[in-house]
Image: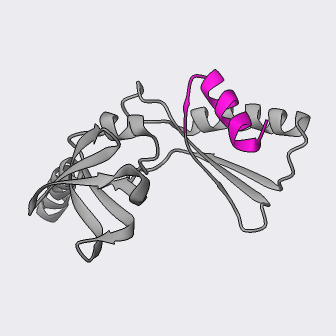
Amino acid sequence: MDVHELLEVTVTGLGYELVDVERSPRGRVLRVFIDKPEKPRGVDIDDCALVSNQLSRVLTVENVDYERLEVSSPGIDRPLKKDADFERFSGSEVTLRLRLPLEGRRNFSGVLLGLREGKVRLRTAAGEMEFDRGNLDKARVVPRFDGLMKSGEKLVEEVMRK
């Protein structure tokens, strides 16, 4: 069993989703990004600690060579890696980077309309577009700060009044 497969089995066995895995250039640092879709506010430090402890044991038993293990959430600019991600985040604003240019461009942004027949559908300012799933280099959800900004603005106003 390869390392990615080992991580996938362990993380999903604990009830989490394996979002991504990164290894440092020399393979000394192993970064594991997890999510729990049914948890509205995402994974927290307790989730990361639980997964980290279990992975440490499994990686030791399986003699996987690494120096440091880092387990975290995928962040608010979550990468879209699996086909299911493109359906789950349909309706969200995303950015896409293509491997090969389309109409002279490699970077696109818009509202994700899902995945159909191997093509990622996106509503852009220029209209609806489709991109071959195999041509995607990176896809990420665009963070939304609308609610945070409004509460932050209220806080600033209250501080200014005092």
Instruction: Give the percent coordinates (x, y) of residue 122.
Output: 21, 51
Nearest to the observer: residue 53 or residue 8: 8
Q: Is residue 104 above or below residue 53?
A: below
Q: Nearer the viewer, residue 49 or 26?
A: 26
The region drawn magenta spans 1-18
The answer to whether residue 138 is seen in the rendering is no
Q: State which quadrant residue 109 falls in.
A: bottom left
- The residue under the point 60% across, 26% down is 12
Q: How many marks?
A: 0
- On the rendered structure, is 156 left or right of 74? left
Going by the picture, which residue comes out furthest to the bottom? 104
Front position in the image: 158 or 96: 96
User: Residue pushed farthest front?
Assistant: 117
Residue shown at the point (22%, 55%) measured from the top left? 152
Residue 64 shows up from this direction: yes
Q: Is residue 25 magenta?
A: no
In this picture, residue 112 sits left or right of residue 27: left
- Image coords of residue 60 (percent x, y): 88, 39
Give left or right: position of 96 versus 99.
Answer: left
Residue 72 in the figure: left or right of residue 98:
right
Given residues 137 and 29, the one toward you in this image is: 137
Quadrant of image for the N terminus: top right
Question: Where is residue 98 drawn, in percent x and y?
Answer: 37, 65
Q: Quadrant of the C terminus?
A: bottom left
Give the residue drawn at x 40%, y 34%.
84
Q: Is 72 rendered above or below residue 126?
A: above
Please, what is the dominant secondary structure of the magenta stretch?
helix
Answer above or below: position of 111 versus 35. Answer: below
Q: How is the image coloured?
A: one colour
